[in-house]
Image (cartoon, grey):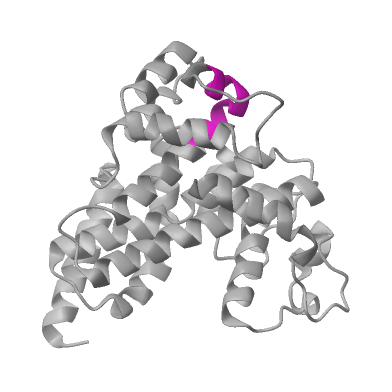
Amino acid sequence: MSAEAMQIAAGFVQELAGDLNKGNLELPMFPDSVIRIQQTFRADEVDINDVVQIISSDPALAARILELANSAAIRGAAEILEVRQAVIRIGNKLVQSSAVAFALREAERSEGLSEEQRVVLRDIWAESVELAARSYVIAKKYTKLNADEALLTGLLSVLGRLYIFMKSAEQGVTDYAALEGIIADWHPAICKAIAESWNMSDELVNALETQLDTNPELRESASLAEVLSASRLVFEHETSGESLDAGEFPLLQRLGIADQNESAVTLDEHAEAINDIRQGLKG
């Protein structure tokens, strides 16, 4: 990285630290409707009328919610045609997840982006979907955790990367490869701050904060932190083509995903379920 780029990056990190301290973590690429939905769910008692009104005010988001409600992963006996029915069918966690997935997809489609920027955003969007799908399946098949909350955790786990990308663009940083160190150091803390500002559960917040830990703290029962970490391990090894050795990661054994002697751990047996969730989020 050039001296000028290093100076810009240093200023970016300083601004990032200030934003974290002030709790001023805005996501300008997110549609207003999506932010309003997350804020609505901060209340102790959520009014479904408020949720339906916000969703209905954004036709594209409403269409997305209806698509998810009628997807292979969710659909019931009858087709859902109204937003209220869709919200009731999929529940609060999946409404939040669908809104986040919608916002991530819309960010990549924003006007005024260079092709390189679109590629970065497309990668962030794809990673969120893949982590969400795997988190959902791991939670459902191997734990007693709420699989919908695990899915939401997977989606939210990339928001730190998204925030860093947007801030770097504002600062004039175009060498995205050089940002990898900043991302590794900062994005879990940013994810945590955003989740806290949206009043997410303590367990979900902890999962986002420790998402890069390949051996999360052992608890009496499985945690969202373990599910997200396992999901990331599986996804990253699948992406790299490297074998995932259960002997190196006790986490996989604790969750029951693999035996100690398995040297090529995959979720292939759940491929159909993962694909159903993937397609449901992508629409």
Image location of residue 96, percent across then percent down: 48, 34
Residue stretch rendered in magenta on the structure = 85-96
| Residue 24 on the magenta segment | no
Determine if residue 47 is in view: no
Quarter of image, res 160: bottom left
197 is higher (above) or lower (below) than 88: below
Image location of residue 38, percent across then percent down: 41, 31
| Residue 94 on the magenta segment | yes
**What residue occupies the far bottom of the structure in this picture?**
2
Left or right: 91 as drawn, with respect to 96: right
Q: Which quadrant would the N terminus be assigned to in this image?
A: bottom left
Quarter of image, res 249: bottom right
78 is higher (above) or lower (below) than 101: above
Q: Examine the residues drawn in magenta and state their main secondary structure.
A: helix
Left or right: 175 as drawn, with respect to 259: left
Q: Nearer the viewer, residue 100 or 179?
A: 100
Q: Residue at x 25, y 50 (%)?
A: 19
Q: Nearer the viewer, residue 39 or 215?
A: 39
Q: Nearer the viewer, residue 127 or 251?
A: 127
